[in-house]
Image (cartoon, grey):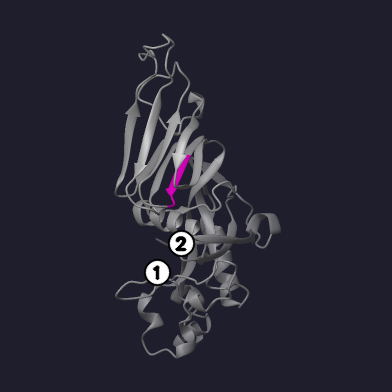
Amino acid sequence: MSDLAGIYASSIHDSLRLYANWPIGDIRKLGDYGKLYGDVFVKEGNLFEEKRFKPKLKRRASKADIVFRFTSQGVSVARLAGGASGVDPASGVQARAGVKISFESGNSVYFRSIKLKHVCIDNAKALNTAILKAFGAGEWDGRTVVVQSLFASDGTTVLISSNDKASIEIEAEANAALPIDLADAKLGLSIASENNVGLSAIAATGLTPLMSLVQVRPINRWLAWLGMSDHTVRPLAAAPDTGFGAVETRTSPLLPTSVDVPPEIAAELRKPVDEVFQVVEID
C-alpha cells in the first residue's frame, strides 16, 4: 500500500469512523463500487452509470453545513503575527495573517473540512435488495463495497508530515479576519514555507473527502467461524495485488472485519439468502 494512502485513510477512519477518499482530488459518486485494501477504497465502477441494477439513483442531501476535523497526536497550530490588526513596524504595511502547523512526528495528519453537505442514496433499500439478489445468484462478489453516502465539501485542508519535526506556514490575505480557518478558500491561503511535509492540500474546493460504505455481511457474524469449511473465510489479504503492495486487514480479537462468506452458506443452512445475509454499512 502507498504509505501516504494508508496513513491518511487509517487516521481518518480510526478517528471519524468514515472512509477517506483517495486520491484526495478524486471525485467520489454515489453508487461507486470497489474493494477495500486496508482502509483505502479502490474504485472498480459505478452501479448507476453501468445500469447494473433496475433501481435508478434517487439522492437526498442535507441542508446544514457540517465540519469535520482531525489532528494526530503531536500536531500543534500556532497563530503568526498579522491580519486585520497586524502592521509590520518596519514598513508600516499591514502584515499578512499566518498560521504555523508543527508536527512532532512523521506520518502525522492534519485534516479539516468545512461547508460539508451530506448526500446519500434515498432509495438505498431497493438497491440493497438488488445487490443481495445478485449476491445470491453468484453475480456479486461479497467483498465488494458500495458508496451509499458521501460528504461534499467547499473547503478541505489535508497535511501529512513525512518526517519528525515537520512544519508548514500558511498565509492568508492581509485583510483576513482572525482567527484563520485553514479550510476556507475565501481567505486566499497560500504556503509561505514548509519542511518535511509529504502532502499538502490547502483549502481545496469541490472535493468529496469522506464517505460511508455498505457491504454484504452475514446477519449472524459468527457464521464465518461456526462449523464452516476453510473456504468460507477468505480475508481480503488473499486478493490479487492492485499496486498498493501488501494488503492490510483490520482485525478484532473476535472476528476479522474483511471476510468473504459465499452465498452457498444459505443453502447449507437451508434458508433463503436474505435470511442469512444483509447489506449493511461497515464501520
What is the secondary structure assignment of the residue under circle 2? loop
Mark 1: which amino acid?
Arg
Residue assigned mark 1: 250
Which residue is painted at 38% across and 12% down in the image?
Answer: 87
> Magenta segment range?
157-162
- The 10 Å Cα crowd at callout 1, few under 14, some 14 to 19, many 20 or more, is some
Question: x and y percent of residue 58 in the render?
Answer: 59, 48
Judging depth in this view, the residue of 168 and 44 nearest the camera is: 168
Image x and y of residue 172, in percent = 46, 25
Residue 27: x, y in percent?
A: 60, 47
Give the image quarter of residue 55: bottom right
* Tags 1 and 2 touching, CB below 8 Å: yes
Q: Which residue is drawn at 70% across and 59% down?
A: 50
Residue behind mark 2: 39
Pick the front one: 216 or 40 = 40
Left or right: 62 with respect to 135? left
The answer for how far apart the CA atoms under marks 1 and 2 are is: 8 Å
SS at mark 1?
Answer: loop
Q: Give the percent coordinates (x, y) of residue 139.
A: 63, 74
Task: Label the magenta part by its dominant secondary structure.
Answer: strand
Residue at position x 45%, y 27% in the image: 171
Q: In which quarter of the image is the C terminus?
A: bottom left
Which class describes the residues within 10 Å of circle 2: few (<14), some (14-19), or many (20+)? Answer: many
Badge 2 amino acid: Asp
